Amino acid sequence: MLKKEIQKIKKSISEDGFYHCQMSNIESFFELSNRLGTIKQYTEVRIDSTKDEFPYISGEVDFHTDNPTIEILGWFTHFQDEHDGKILLINVEDVLSKMTKEEIKCLTNVNIKMPSRKNDYYPFLTEGKKPHIFYIPPHCWKEIPKYTNKQKDAVMKFHSLVLDIKKSKQYHSINLKQGDVLFLNNYFMIHGRNKIAKNSKRFLERVFIQT
Ligand SMILES: [Fe+2]
């Protein structure tokens, strides 16, 4: 792939929040992923009833971000679910645009526990040219008792605005077919999925790309 094409893909991910295309094979997907940054983690995403983390459950996956230190998430599609399995995306700029400056300030002072780490916390929101959000609802609820009332209200407002967008289906819905690839900006896009069958054959490969 030409340098110019890589630049175009990077621009889509950093400005639009995602890049969706079809690729001939998984080797090309890994090659492209390596050109976008450094692959830090690789996961097979498929139903596994012995595990309860998001990549393995058949139930609905609430909107969330993944590890906040990872800017780009990439998926390659081996098999899609027969009925759904679409990846749903919300740009958090659309959520924050409905919040006051004071509420946004509160979110920058709220910390959420990092996944799979004992005592590492990360800010719910870091402001910049684009927002950098860290949002995993179950982790937020565990921290809520530690927050001030204003911080609590700000987190709950963010959450209820996400639910409003979800209810009115004002999200991007990406239907990944076999051979499809999706790269997502994990800093300012949150992702989720509807419920799928317990025996779904849906099988994706996911990479965490550090830029
Ligand atoms: Fe996720």
Image (tube, rainbow, N blue to C red):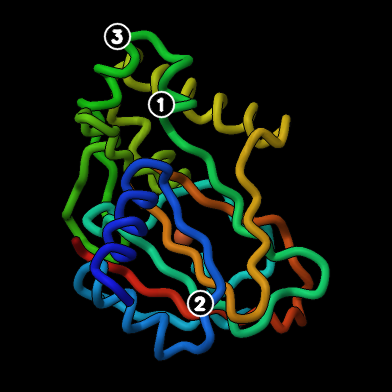
Callout in the foreground (2, 1): 2
Q: Earlier in the sequence, mark 2 or mark 1?
A: 2
Q: Is residue 122 visible?
A: yes
The kind of residue on which mark 1 rests is Val
Residue behind mark 2? 76
Q: Where is residue 71? Give x, y as percent.
A: 27, 55
The Cα atoms of the two marked residues, 2 and 1, are separated by: 33 Å
Q: Is residue 135 left or right of residue 160?
A: left
Q: Where is residue 56? Give x, y as percent.
A: 56, 74
Residue behind mark 1? 155
The Cα atoms of the two marked residues, 3 and 2, are separated by: 40 Å
Q: Is residue 52 visible?
A: no
Quick check: 162 above or below 137?
above
Q: Residue at x 41, y 46 (%)?
A: 17
Quick check: 83 above or below 96?
below
Element at label 3: helix
Element at label 1: helix
Residue behind mark 3? 102
Q: Residue at x 57, y 52 (%)?
A: 192
Work out whether residue 130 or residue 193 is closer to the camera in this orientation and state it.
130
Q: Where is residue 32? Give x, y as percent.
A: 33, 76
Quick check: 189 above or below 34?
above
- Image quarter where the N terminus lies is bottom left
Residues marked 1 and 3 touching at CB (< 8 Å): no
Q: How many marks?
A: 3
Q: Residue at x 48, y 80 (%)?
A: 205
The kind of residue on which mark 2 rests is Phe
